[in-house]
Image (cartoon, grey):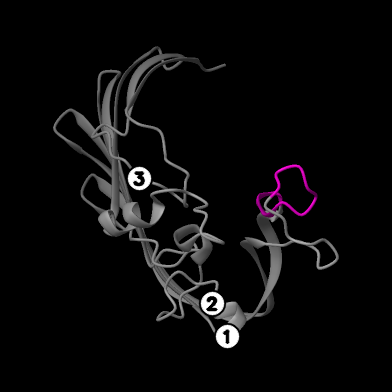
Amino acid sequence: MKIGNWKGFVDVAGFINHYDNMMEFTFGFYKPDSIPTSLNPNAPGYFKKWFGFRAQNAESADIAGAEISVSGEGAIGPIRVLALLGYTYMNPISKNQDSAYRSTFSDTSSNMLKYRFNHLAKADLQLEWKGISIGGSMRFNSYMKNVDAIFENGFLGQEILPGLKDYRKENNGPTIVFDARIGYCYKEKYKIAFIVNNIANAEYMTRPGDIQAPRSFLIQLSYKL
């Protein structure tokens, strides 16, 4: 689309994916039956040695959703403006009702597949004037409702990730992360930029135990051939 000195595009898509015999890495206790469980750290059957992820057959699943993206550029007086917006909605549903499989869910009241988000969004805006650029971006994802239950409940009275259950209860809302940048481009070949990632110093995880980087500052030099 084009309106005056503004131009851009809008893209809208819907999707429905059905999976049969879908594989899913599941965290659990996978000790061979031939080795007796032991509380002795030096024994082959010491229970802490057999925790980990293993590919499991999650059987049937449906992932449906829609996404929209808008990108455009134009000018406000002498200032060039570039913008990008994107949003994705997903409904990742497990159709496997087997009780053993469902017992691995941290939220057994839900059919939602583990480690998935319902809502994802991103936005980016940049202003340019005489080689100087100022920009910012935003990343958004909804709460990860379902993870492996063992991360929250532990095993044989032992916590896998101590404090995770309380952390998830206290941080059960969406995650929003902002980044900012300023740069200068000389003769379209040389560029220097100052970048601040996670400018609000948000504390968030992409999966259990994976705390993402706090606020960071970067200086970037680049040369274009």
The disc at residue 204 is 3
Which residue matches tag 1? 99
Q: Nearer the viewer, residue 65 or 85?
A: 65
**Which of the marked residues, 3 or 2, is nearer the chain's N terminus?**
2
Give the structural element (helix, strand or loop) at label 1: helix
Which residue matches tag 2? 103
| Left or right: where 33 falls relative to 180 | right
Q: Residues within 10 Å of mark 2 (few under 14, many from 20)?
A: few
Given contact means CB atoms under 8 Å apart, are the residues at marks 3 and 2 in contact?
Answer: no
Start and end of the magenta stretch?
40-49
Give the structural element (helix, strand or loop) at label 3: loop
Position of residue 39 measured from the top left corner of the image (x, y, whole percent): 67, 52
Distance between the alpha carbons at the discs numbered 3 and 2 = 26 Å
Name the residue at 55% across, 61% down: 155
**Magenta-span inclusion, residue 145:** no
Q: Nearer the viewer, residue 137 or 178?
A: 178
Give the structural element (helix, strand or loop) at label 2: loop
Say if 60 sits above or below 204 in the image.
Answer: below
Q: Residues within 10 Å of mark 3 (few under 14, many from 20)?
A: some
The disc at residue 209 is none
The amino acid type, in three-letter code, at marker 3 is Tyr
- Residue 121 shows up from this direction: no
Q: Specify the quadrant that holds the N terminus.
A: bottom left
Q: Nearer the viewer, residue 125 or 189?
A: 125
Say if 91 sits above or below 28 in the image.
Answer: below
Position of residue 220 measured from the top left corner of the image (x, y, whole percent): 43, 16
Q: Specify the quadrant that holds the C terminus.
A: top right
